[in-house]
Amino acid sequence: MNTVDQRVRLGVSACLLGEEVRYDGGHKRDRFLTETLGGFVEWVQVCPEVEAGMGTPRPAMRLVRAPGGSIRLITVVDGVDLTATMRTFAATRAKQLAAMDLDGYVLKKDSPSCGLERVRVYAESGPPARNGRGLFGLWKSLEAQGKENQHDAAAVKAQYEKAWRSADTKLTVEDL
Ligand code: SF4
């Protein structure tokens, strides 16, 4: 955002705007985003899994810690490893987004691709650890740009107003 008469531009997980891009063909439309915030911002939609060519519907996937310690993106039922597919796609797409210098991001929580933090990571046994980050890796470029601030949903409006007033304020929201 450069001037007050320009809309704030926010990257957003496409499913949060009602796009039917989830693994089961559904969406996670959020009314605050579409009916309140949507009137004042320009959305830049991203669905890493669809854009990486995984299709809709597609097998559900999750983060898994491999025996060597690396984090993999694995389909739940068949155990197909999609890590390389996602990393290859992300290397290009994340750079595109960084070059757009967006004012912030609204990302779907818990997603093994979009989630910024606290994403479930499964091991061979036992309950999942809540310490993963989505493999799309947008958090890497956010941190590199000093935009890693995150806020809970209750703070979205206040942060939006702040972003509107200041071109230097960046907004990142995951708790939707
Ligand atoms: S959470 Fe991300 S990868 Fe999953 S459907 Fe939404 S936009 Fe696509």
Image (spheres, rainbow, N blue to C red):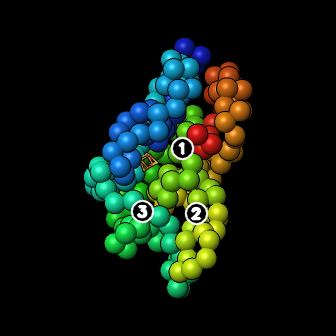
The amino acid type, in three-letter code, at marker 3 is: Met
Residue 144 visible somewhere in the drawing: no
Which residue is more in the foreground, 120 or 164?
A: 120
Crowding near the residue tagged with mark 2, few <14, some 14–19, many ≥20 C-alpha atoms within 10 Å? many
Q: Is residue 70 left or right of residue 165?
A: left
Residue 70 rendering spot, x and y as whole percentages: 52, 77
Q: Is residue 144 left or right of residue 66?
A: right
Q: Is mark 1 within 8 Å of ligand 1?
A: yes
Crowding near the residue tagged with mark 3, few <14, some 14–19, many ≥20 C-alpha atoms within 10 Å? many
Relative to 105, residue 78 above or below: below
Q: Which residue is mark 3?
A: 61
Q: Earlier in the sequence, mark 2 or mark 3?
A: 3
Q: Disc 3, disc 1: CB below 8 Å? A: no
Q: CA distance from mark 3 to mark 1?
A: 17 Å
Residue 156 rendering spot, x and y as whole percentages: 66, 31
Q: Which residue is mark 2?
A: 120
Q: Earlier in the sequence, mark 3 or mark 1?
A: 3
Crowding near the residue tagged with mark 1, few <14, some 14–19, many ≥20 C-alpha atoms within 10 Å? many
Residue 110 rendering spot, x and y as whole percentages: 56, 53
Q: Secondary structure at mark 3?
A: strand
Q: Residue visible at 57% across and 34% down?
A: 103
Relative to 31, residue 63 above or below: below
